[in-house]
Image (tube, helix red, strand yellow):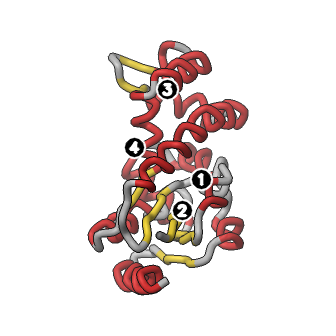
């Protein structure tokens, strides 16, 4: 079974692309969703997050994402510390999930696939790209944050140029090119390998 990474900067549309793969019957592991779930479910990880950011990290039993985002997106050192806590747990979770799949290939969706080194355990990587201003407007609309907050988050991720150097395939999500056609082409390639 091929392990395919799916990455792209914030607002690029990688989740939309992942949904197209899901519609084709391909199992998709969402690193972001699983990380949030593990930060709630995994007691040692939960305790470590509280140790790093304090009791405010959780409100009424739920992850206080806005609070944690305010800590990590303004402080690279804090972001690195959080990633160092979450990513080893996430890696093990992905391995367990992968062992249960029975498809020609699977997709691992992760915004910071290269930044964390998670791409090293994958066979191929797809990069989803979109124009910068389009990405910003998507995130402003989706998350209800301002332009500057989006730029601060973008600054914590590798540029598309850096990611493209290590990617095997690129999907353009500029609202002009057909996502479906691009995904179907890759689906055919991965299904035949």
**Sequence order check, earlier mark of 4 and 1:** 1
Residue hosting label 3 = 67
User: Is residue 2 placed above or below 111 in the rendered structure?
Assistant: below
* Mark 3–mark 4 distance (CA, rounded to whole Å): 15 Å
Q: Residue at point 53% right, 34% down?
A: 69
Is 174 situated left or right of 88 in this image? left
Alpha carbons under labels 1 and 2: distance apart: 7 Å
Disc 2 crowd, CA 10 A, few/some/many (<14, 14-19, 20+): many
Q: Can I make out residue 177 in this image?
A: no
Q: Is residue 187 above or below residue 77?
A: below
Point out which mark residue 97 bears: none
Q: Are marks 4 and 1 in contact (CB under 8 Å)?
A: no
Q: Residue furthest top?
A: 55
The first of marks 3 and 4 along the sequence is 3
Query: Mark 1 and 2 residues: CB-CB less than 8 Å, in contact?
Result: yes
Which comes sooner in the sequence, label 1 or label 3? 3
Which residue is located at x 43 percent, y 26 percent?
64
**Could you tell me if the residues under marks 1 and 3 are in contact, i.e. CB atoms within 8 Å?**
no
Residue tagged 1: 112
* Residue 45 place in picture, x, y as percent: 52, 26
Choose the circle earlier in sequence order: 2 or 4. 2
In percent of the image, x 45 and y 73: which residue is there?
173
Residue 190 against residue 9 in the figure, above or below? below
Which mark sits nearer the N-terminus, 3 or 2?
2
Q: In this figure, which residue is indicated by the disc labeled 2?
A: 7
Q: Distance between the Cα atoms at labels 3 and 2? A: 25 Å
């Amino acid at each position: 079974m091929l392990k395919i990474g799916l990455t792209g900067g914030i607002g690029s549309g990688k989740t939309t692309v992942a949904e197209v793969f899901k519609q084709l019957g391909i199992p998709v592991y969402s690193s972001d969703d699983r990380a949030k779930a593990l930060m709630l479910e995994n007691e040692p990880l939960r305790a470590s997050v509280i140790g790093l950011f304090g009791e405010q990290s959780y409100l009424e039993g739920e992850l206080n994402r806005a609070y944690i985002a305010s800590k990590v997106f303004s402080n690279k050192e804090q972001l690195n510390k959080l990633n160092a806590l979450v990513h080893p747990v996430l890696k093990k979770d992905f391995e367990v999930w992968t062992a249960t799949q029975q498809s020609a290939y699977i997709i691992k969706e992760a915004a910071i696939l290269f930044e964390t080194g998670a791409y090293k355990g994958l066979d191929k990587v797809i990069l989803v790209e979109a124009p910068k201003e389009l990405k910003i407007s998507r995130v402003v609309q989706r998350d209800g944050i301002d332009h500057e907050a989006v730029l601060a988050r973008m600054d914590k991720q590798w540029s598309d140029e850096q990611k493209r150097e290590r990617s095997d395939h690129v999907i353009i999500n500029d609202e002009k090119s057909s996502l479906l056609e691009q995904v179907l082409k890759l689906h055919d390639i991965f299904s035949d390998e």
